[in-house]
Structures are given as C-alpha cells and as structure tokens.
C-alpha cells in the first residue's frame, strides 16, 4: 500500500512474526474507572493519559512499527460540553508537554482525523508537534482525533473523485489499493492487532476499512489500568492466532514447508 506522493518513510519490515507491525487501540473505560472511585470523568481521562505514555513506550521497546490510538471520535462531541472542553484542554496539554519525550524516543507523530473542527490554536500545536518529530523513524504514532472510519472513507473518496474530474485518473482505475492509499493511515500497513479496553465489543466507527483482516482483542481492563503487562498479554494472544486470509489451515502449513 504505497503512496508515491507521500514523503513519509516506508514502515520497517516485520521484526518478529509474533510482534504485530501495527497495533490499533480503542482506549475505552476512563469514565467508568473514575466514577467507580467517586471521581469526575476527567480524572479518569487524566489517568488514562498515563497509560498512553506507558503503552507508547512499551510498543517502541517491543519494535512495533506503528501504533494508532483512538483519542476522540467524531461522535464524542455529543458528550456534555464540560467533558468535551476538558478533553480539549487535556489534548492541548499533551501536545505541549509530551512532545519532548517523543522526540527523545525516536517516535514520529501524526494526528489523523477531521482536524478542521479543532480551530487554529490546536491545529498550530498539531503542526508544530508533527514537525518536531518528522525525522524520527523508530516508531510511527498515529493519534486519531475527531476521527471516524466513515469520514475517512468519504474523504478518501472525495480525493479520488477530484482526481478523476481533473483527468489524473479514470473512474475504472479506482481499486482497493488506490482508495486505501488515500485513507488517513496512508502508507502504513493495516493493523495486525486491534485492542479495545473497557469491555465493549464494538468498533465504534474506528478504522472500519483498515480492520478488514485485523485480529480483534477485547479486554475488560479499563484503560487507566491497562499497562505494559496487559499489552504483553494481548501480543501473546496475537502470536497464537493463525491468519488465514480466506485460505485453509492446510494450505498455510503447506506454504510454510514449501
Ligand atoms: C474513553 O473512555 C475516552 C474517550 C472516549 C475520550 P470513556 O470516556 O468512553 O470511558 P467510559 O466508556 O465512559 O468508561
Ligand atoms: C470510542 O469510545 C472512542 C474513543 C475511545 C476515543 P466511546 O466510549 O466513545 O465508544 P461508544 O460510544 O461506547 O461506542
Ligand atoms: Mg466509552
């Protein structure tokens, strides 16, 4: 899935068959974690930010090439105004204070989603943070903010439609690879492992196209409690999966011994 127009570096080859190249996470359960302790929901989001830091570090140490974290969905604007405002403040503070550690750890940051809704202050901070990490190549970190999987497919379709209208491509040239290259995840391979914390078993409009063949791991652990040991449990589970992509087990074992 290469996009010749992209200036992003190609993702490193898989270092170890048991380690997913790309992990995508729905970080759910902050609110329940806090309310069960008699605290406000935002306290849970702040605690959740500590898990974010630990999981980013742990993924880099385990040679994961790409980590995508769902931070704020296109539907989360429907939450009480006060929670949305405090989440935006938390986002700003992370963009201001956590970038040094990404720079020092070789992590390249990109925010994916419909960023127009965030306004100029947050957009400037995003640009600055992305630029500061642009030369890093140890791990790609994608943060999905005001992201929706349906939005992503629609925006990719709009780009292809514009290219068709301008004569750059013909409608009949459009195939899965061409559309995938225009998605917000761009050149990055589809996630190998999806993790959702917090007990719900749904995709909640996350990477709906890109999860087509991803291994799906659900855990009841609430996000503020999800730490490196929990990540290792998910990776161990992933290592035991047989990814058949429509083939049979027998075909795969024959290919292994060929
Ligand atoms: C996920 O935790 C964080 C965001 C959606 C921003 P929640 O806030 O959804 O926590 P629960 O699901 O209510 O416990
Ligand atoms: C999904 O969690 C979005 C993020 C974690 C950012 P939600 O808590 O918003 O999902 P639903 O509403 O329970 O499906
Ligand atoms: Mg939730």
Image: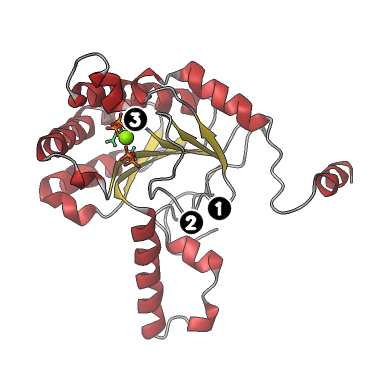
In the rendering, which numbered label is found on residue 155?
Answer: none
Based on the displayed image, in which of its 4 quarters is residue 82 positioned?
A: top left
Tag 2's secondary structure? loop
Residue contact between numbered discs 2 and 3, judged by CB atoms under 8 Å? no
Q: CA distance from mark 2 to mark 1?
A: 6 Å
Residue 102 - label: 3
Q: Position of residue 111 (x, y in %)?
A: 31, 45
Q: Residue at x 62, y 39 (%)?
A: 14
Cα gap from disc 2 to disc 3, whole angstroms: 28 Å
Q: Residue at x 85, y 45 (%)?
A: 250
Mark 3: which secondary structure? helix
Q: Identify the secondary structure beneath mark 1.
A: loop
Marks 1, 3: nearer the viewer: 1
Residue annotated with mark 2: 209
**Residue placed most toward the observer, 1 or 75:** 75
* Residue to which mark 1 is pinned: 212
Q: Give the answer, above or below, for where 20 lies relative to 131.
A: above
Q: Residue at x 47, y 19 (%)?
A: 228
Q: Nearer the viewer, residue 223 or 111?
A: 223
Circle 2 crowding by C-alpha within 10 Å: few under 14, some 14–19, many from 20: some
50 in relation to 63, above or below = above
Q: CA distance from mark 1 to mark 3?
A: 30 Å
Q: Is mark 1 within 8 Å of ligand 2?
A: no
Mark 3 closeness class: few <14, some 14–19, many ≥20 residues within 10 Å: many
| Residue 43 or residue 157, whichever sits in front | 43
Q: Position of residue 140 (x, y in %)?
A: 43, 40
Q: Give the mark nearer the N terminus: 1 vs 3.
A: 3
Q: Quadrant of residue 239?
A: top right
Marks 2/1 in contact by CB < 8 Å: the verdict is: yes
Ligand 2 shown in quarter: top left
- Residues packed near mark 1 inside 10 Å, few (<14), some (14 to 19) or many (20 plus): few
Q: Sequence-wise, which precedes: disc 2 or disc 3?
A: 3
């Amino acid at each position: 899935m290469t996009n010749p127009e992209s200036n992003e570096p190609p993702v490193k080859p898989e270092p170890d068959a048991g380690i997913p190249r790309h992990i995508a996470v729905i970080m759910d359960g902050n609110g329940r974690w806090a309310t069960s302790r008699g605290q406000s929901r935002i306290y849970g989001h702040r605690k959740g930010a500590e898990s974010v830091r630990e999981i980013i570090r742990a993924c880099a140490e385990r040679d994961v090439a790409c980590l995508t974290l769902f931070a704020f969905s296109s539907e989360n604007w429907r939450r009480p105004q006060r929670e949305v405002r405090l989440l935006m403040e938390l986002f700003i503070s992370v963009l201001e204070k956590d970038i040094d550690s990404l720079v020092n750890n070789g992590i390249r940051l990109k925010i994916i989603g419909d960023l127009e809704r965030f306004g100029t202050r947050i957009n400037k901070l995003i640009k600055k943070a992305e630029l500061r990490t642009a030369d890093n190549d140890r791990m790609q970190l994608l943060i999905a903010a005001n992201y929706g999987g349906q939005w992503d497919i629609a925006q990719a379709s709009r780009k292809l439609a514009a290219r068709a209208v301008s004569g750059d491509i013909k409608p009949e040239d459009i195939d899965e690879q061409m559309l995938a290259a225009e998605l917000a995840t761009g050149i990055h391979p589809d996630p190998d492992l999806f993790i959702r914390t917090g007990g719900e078993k749904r995709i909640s409009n996350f990477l709906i196209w890109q999860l087509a063949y991803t291994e799906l791991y659900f855990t009841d652990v609430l996000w503020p409690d999800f730490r490196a040991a929990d990540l290792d449990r998910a990776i161990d589970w992933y290592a035991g999966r047989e990814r058949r992509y429509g083939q049979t087990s027998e075909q795969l074992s024959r290919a292994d011994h060929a």
